[in-house]
Amino acid sequence: MKCGVVIFPGSNCDHDLMDVLANMTGEAPIALWHKDTTLQGCTHVFLPGGFSYGDYLRSGAIAKLSPIMQAVSEHAANGGFVMGICNGFQILCESGLLPGALLRNTNMKFTCKNVYLTPGNTETQVTRSLDKTAVITVPIAHGEGRFYADEDTLAQLEKNGQVIFRYCDASGSVNEESNPNGSLNHIAGVCNAGFNVFGMMPHPERCASEALSNTDGRAVFESIFSLIAH
Protein backbone atom coordinates (compact mmCIF):
# COMPACT_ATOMS: atom_id res chain seq x y z
CA MET A 1 0.00 0.00 0.00
CA LYS A 2 1.36 3.40 -0.99
CA CYS A 3 -0.60 6.65 -0.62
CA GLY A 4 -0.31 9.72 -2.80
CA VAL A 5 -1.88 13.17 -2.45
CA VAL A 6 -2.36 15.23 -5.60
CA ILE A 7 -1.46 18.90 -5.14
CA PHE A 8 -2.92 21.54 -7.45
CA PRO A 9 -2.24 25.30 -7.45
CA GLY A 10 -4.67 26.48 -4.79
CA SER A 11 -4.87 23.25 -2.78
CA ASN A 12 -4.90 24.10 0.92
CA CYS A 13 -5.79 20.87 2.70
CA ASP A 14 -2.98 18.76 1.27
CA HIS A 15 -0.76 18.85 4.34
CA ASP A 16 -3.68 18.20 6.70
CA LEU A 17 -4.50 15.12 4.66
CA MET A 18 -0.88 14.00 4.39
CA ASP A 19 -0.44 14.25 8.17
CA VAL A 20 -3.48 12.05 8.76
CA LEU A 21 -2.37 9.49 6.17
CA ALA A 22 1.11 9.34 7.67
CA ASN A 23 -0.38 8.88 11.13
CA MET A 24 -2.76 6.16 10.00
CA THR A 25 -0.33 4.16 7.85
CA GLY A 26 3.01 4.84 9.50
CA GLU A 27 4.45 5.99 6.17
CA ALA A 28 4.69 9.45 4.64
CA PRO A 29 2.47 9.73 1.53
CA ILE A 30 3.88 10.83 -1.82
CA ALA A 31 3.19 14.42 -2.87
CA LEU A 32 1.98 14.23 -6.47
CA TRP A 33 2.29 17.57 -8.30
CA HIS A 34 -0.44 18.46 -10.78
CA LYS A 35 2.09 18.50 -13.65
CA ASP A 36 3.28 14.96 -12.92
CA THR A 37 2.32 12.31 -15.45
CA THR A 38 2.65 9.21 -13.24
CA LEU A 39 1.39 8.22 -9.80
CA GLN A 40 4.82 6.92 -8.74
CA GLY A 41 3.41 3.55 -7.84
CA CYS A 42 0.75 4.86 -5.47
CA THR A 43 -2.08 2.42 -4.78
CA HIS A 44 -4.30 4.90 -2.92
CA VAL A 45 -4.67 8.34 -4.48
CA PHE A 46 -6.28 11.29 -2.69
CA LEU A 47 -7.38 14.67 -4.07
CA PRO A 48 -7.50 17.22 -1.22
CA GLY A 49 -9.66 20.24 -0.54
CA GLY A 50 -8.86 23.82 -1.45
CA PHE A 51 -9.50 26.15 -4.35
CA SER A 52 -7.68 24.60 -7.28
CA TYR A 53 -6.82 27.24 -9.88
CA GLY A 54 -8.81 29.74 -7.84
CA ASP A 55 -12.08 27.95 -8.64
CA TYR A 56 -12.21 29.86 -11.95
CA LEU A 57 -14.93 28.80 -14.40
CA ARG A 58 -16.32 26.22 -11.94
CA SER A 59 -14.74 24.45 -8.99
CA GLY A 60 -12.56 21.70 -10.43
CA ALA A 61 -13.20 22.64 -14.07
CA ILE A 62 -9.58 23.61 -14.78
CA ALA A 63 -7.99 21.04 -12.47
CA LYS A 64 -9.54 18.23 -14.48
CA LEU A 65 -7.24 19.27 -17.36
CA SER A 66 -4.04 18.88 -15.31
CA PRO A 67 -1.59 16.27 -16.67
CA ILE A 68 -1.82 14.19 -13.46
CA MET A 69 -5.53 13.57 -14.04
CA GLN A 70 -4.82 11.28 -16.99
CA ALA A 71 -2.89 9.01 -14.65
CA VAL A 72 -5.61 9.28 -12.01
CA SER A 73 -8.27 8.33 -14.57
CA GLU A 74 -6.25 5.32 -15.74
CA HIS A 75 -5.69 4.25 -12.13
CA ALA A 76 -9.44 4.46 -11.47
CA ALA A 77 -10.27 2.58 -14.66
CA ASN A 78 -7.97 -0.23 -13.52
CA GLY A 79 -9.82 -0.51 -10.21
CA GLY A 80 -7.39 1.57 -8.16
CA PHE A 81 -8.54 3.48 -5.10
CA VAL A 82 -9.21 7.20 -5.59
CA MET A 83 -10.78 9.59 -3.10
CA GLY A 84 -11.58 13.29 -3.41
CA ILE A 85 -12.46 15.51 -0.46
CA CYS A 86 -14.33 18.81 -0.95
CA ASN A 87 -12.53 20.40 -3.93
CA GLY A 88 -11.19 16.93 -4.72
CA PHE A 89 -14.80 15.70 -4.94
CA GLN A 90 -15.59 18.57 -7.30
CA ILE A 91 -12.60 17.68 -9.49
CA LEU A 92 -13.64 14.03 -9.70
CA CYS A 93 -17.16 15.02 -10.74
CA GLU A 94 -15.84 17.46 -13.34
CA SER A 95 -13.54 14.71 -14.65
CA GLY A 96 -16.40 12.28 -15.03
CA LEU A 97 -14.89 9.86 -12.52
CA LEU A 98 -17.89 10.39 -10.25
CA PRO A 99 -21.53 10.99 -11.22
CA GLY A 100 -23.34 14.26 -10.61
CA ALA A 101 -22.10 17.79 -10.01
CA LEU A 102 -21.51 20.20 -7.13
CA LEU A 103 -23.47 23.43 -7.48
CA ARG A 104 -23.65 26.66 -5.48
CA ASN A 105 -25.11 26.27 -2.01
CA THR A 106 -28.77 27.20 -1.92
CA ASN A 107 -28.03 30.03 0.54
CA MET A 108 -25.47 31.38 -1.98
CA LYS A 109 -22.91 31.67 0.82
CA PHE A 110 -19.65 29.99 1.72
CA THR A 111 -20.52 27.75 4.67
CA CYS A 112 -17.96 26.69 7.27
CA LYS A 113 -19.22 24.73 10.26
CA ASN A 114 -19.55 21.27 11.78
CA VAL A 115 -22.28 19.03 10.37
CA TYR A 116 -23.59 15.59 11.20
CA LEU A 117 -23.23 12.68 8.79
CA THR A 118 -24.68 9.20 8.66
CA PRO A 119 -23.49 6.48 6.27
CA GLY A 120 -25.65 5.60 3.29
CA ASN A 121 -23.87 2.28 2.72
CA THR A 122 -21.66 0.66 5.36
CA GLU A 123 -20.10 -1.87 3.02
CA THR A 124 -17.78 0.47 1.11
CA GLN A 125 -14.06 0.99 1.56
CA VAL A 126 -14.65 4.34 3.26
CA THR A 127 -17.58 3.44 5.53
CA ARG A 128 -17.04 -0.15 6.65
CA SER A 129 -15.82 0.91 10.12
CA LEU A 130 -19.21 2.52 10.80
CA ASP A 131 -22.50 0.86 11.67
CA LYS A 132 -25.74 1.76 9.93
CA THR A 133 -26.95 4.03 12.71
CA ALA A 134 -23.67 5.87 13.23
CA VAL A 135 -23.63 9.66 13.40
CA ILE A 136 -20.31 11.46 13.07
CA THR A 137 -19.46 15.15 13.35
CA VAL A 138 -17.38 16.44 10.45
CA PRO A 139 -16.63 20.04 9.34
CA ILE A 140 -17.60 21.48 5.98
CA ALA A 141 -16.08 24.52 4.24
CA HIS A 142 -17.51 25.17 0.80
CA GLY A 143 -19.53 27.51 -1.35
CA GLU A 144 -20.31 24.96 -4.06
CA GLY A 145 -21.28 21.80 -2.24
CA ARG A 146 -24.84 21.19 -3.36
CA PHE A 147 -24.88 17.73 -4.91
CA TYR A 148 -26.99 17.52 -8.04
CA ALA A 149 -27.72 14.74 -10.51
CA ASP A 150 -30.51 14.15 -12.99
CA GLU A 151 -33.43 11.99 -11.93
CA ASP A 152 -32.20 8.80 -13.59
CA THR A 153 -28.67 9.14 -12.23
CA LEU A 154 -29.98 9.84 -8.75
CA ALA A 155 -32.20 6.76 -8.90
CA GLN A 156 -29.24 4.62 -9.97
CA LEU A 157 -27.07 5.96 -7.15
CA GLU A 158 -29.73 5.05 -4.62
CA LYS A 159 -30.45 1.65 -6.15
CA ASN A 160 -26.78 0.67 -6.37
CA GLY A 161 -25.84 1.84 -2.87
CA GLN A 162 -23.47 4.48 -4.19
CA VAL A 163 -24.44 7.12 -1.63
CA ILE A 164 -21.75 6.88 1.04
CA PHE A 165 -22.81 9.73 3.37
CA ARG A 166 -25.88 11.87 3.98
CA TYR A 167 -26.33 15.01 6.06
CA CYS A 168 -28.39 14.39 9.19
CA ASP A 169 -29.05 15.84 12.63
CA ALA A 170 -27.49 14.80 15.93
CA SER A 171 -29.97 11.94 16.33
CA GLY A 172 -29.31 10.60 12.84
CA SER A 173 -32.53 11.90 11.34
CA VAL A 174 -32.15 12.96 7.70
CA ASN A 175 -34.20 16.12 7.15
CA GLU A 176 -34.19 19.49 5.40
CA GLU A 177 -33.06 21.35 8.52
CA SER A 178 -29.86 19.29 8.68
CA ASN A 179 -28.99 19.81 5.01
CA PRO A 180 -26.42 22.66 4.91
CA ASN A 181 -26.30 23.26 1.16
CA GLY A 182 -29.46 21.92 -0.48
CA SER A 183 -27.93 18.69 -1.80
CA LEU A 184 -30.43 16.38 -3.45
CA ASN A 185 -31.41 13.46 -1.19
CA HIS A 186 -29.18 15.11 1.45
CA ILE A 187 -26.15 13.55 -0.24
CA ALA A 188 -22.76 14.42 1.28
CA GLY A 189 -20.71 11.84 -0.61
CA VAL A 190 -20.93 9.26 -3.38
CA CYS A 191 -18.86 6.60 -5.09
CA ASN A 192 -18.71 5.25 -8.62
CA ALA A 193 -20.43 2.08 -9.82
CA GLY A 194 -17.18 0.16 -9.37
CA PHE A 195 -16.92 1.17 -5.69
CA ASN A 196 -13.29 2.27 -6.03
CA VAL A 197 -13.67 6.04 -6.58
CA PHE A 198 -15.08 8.09 -3.72
CA GLY A 199 -15.96 11.72 -3.07
CA MET A 200 -17.30 13.65 -0.11
CA MET A 201 -17.73 17.35 0.63
CA PRO A 202 -17.12 17.26 4.43
CA HIS A 203 -13.52 17.13 5.66
CA PRO A 204 -12.69 13.97 7.66
CA GLU A 205 -9.01 14.97 7.73
CA ARG A 206 -9.96 18.01 9.80
CA CYS A 207 -11.43 15.90 12.59
CA ALA A 208 -9.02 12.99 12.92
CA SER A 209 -6.82 14.20 15.76
CA GLU A 210 -7.12 14.64 19.51
CA ALA A 211 -5.44 18.02 19.04
CA LEU A 212 -8.54 19.14 17.13
CA SER A 213 -10.88 17.87 19.87
CA ASN A 214 -12.67 15.65 17.37
CA THR A 215 -11.61 12.25 16.04
CA ASP A 216 -14.83 11.25 14.24
CA GLY A 217 -13.10 11.55 10.88
CA ARG A 218 -10.70 8.76 11.78
CA ALA A 219 -13.48 6.25 11.07
CA VAL A 220 -13.23 7.09 7.38
CA PHE A 221 -9.49 6.44 7.28
CA GLU A 222 -9.77 3.40 9.54
CA SER A 223 -12.26 2.02 7.03
CA ILE A 224 -9.88 2.62 4.15
CA PHE A 225 -6.89 1.05 5.84
CA SER A 226 -8.77 -1.58 7.86
CA LEU A 227 -6.90 -0.67 11.03
CA ILE A 228 -9.81 -1.45 13.31
CA ALA A 229 -12.85 -3.69 13.18
CA HIS A 230 -16.34 -2.69 14.27
Image (spheres, helix red, strand yellow):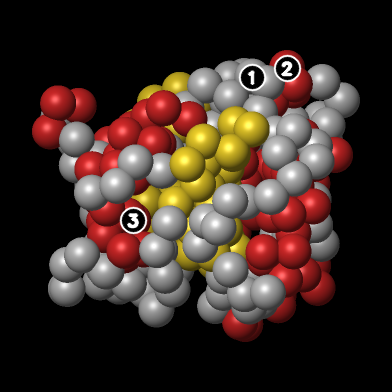
Q: Name the amino acid, label 2.
A: Gly
Seen from the viewer's position, the closer of residues 20 and 86 is 20
Circles 2 and 1, Cβ within 8 Å, touching? The answer is yes
Could you tell me how many numbered marks the image carries? Answer: 3
Circles 3 and 2, Cβ within 8 Å, touching? The answer is no
Circles 1 and 3, Cβ within 8 Å, touching? The answer is no
What's the residue at 75%, 45% (across, down)? Answer: 37
Q: Which mark is residue 220?
A: 3
Task: Determine the secondary structure under disc 2.
Answer: helix
Q: Position of residue 146 (x, y in %)?
A: 65, 41
Q: Which mark is residue 43?
A: none
Gap in Å between the C-alphas at discs 2 and 1? 6 Å
Gap in Å between the C-alphas at discs 3 and 2? 28 Å
The mark nearer the N terminus, 3 or 2, is: 2
Instruction: Residue under label 1, please give it.
Output: 10
**Disc 2 or disc 1, which is closer to the eye?**
1
The mark nearer the N terminus, 2 or 1, is: 1
The mark nearer the N terminus, 1 or 3, is: 1
What's the residue at 71%, 39% (across, down)? Answer: 36
What's the residue at 55%, 58% (across, down)? Answer: 41
Q: Name the amino acid, label 3.
A: Val
Residue 154 appears in the figure: no
Seen from the viewer's position, the closer of residues 22 and 164 is 22
Tell me where residue 142 sits by quadrant: top right
Q: Is residue 98 left or right of residue 130?
A: right
Q: Position of residue 72 (x, y in %)?
A: 69, 54
Q: Is residue 184 left or right of residue 205?
A: right
Instruction: Residue under label 2, please give it.
Output: 54
The C terminus is located in which quarter? Answer: bottom left
Gap in Å between the C-alphas at discs 1 and 3? 24 Å
Seen from the viewer's position, the closer of residues 228 and 70 is 70
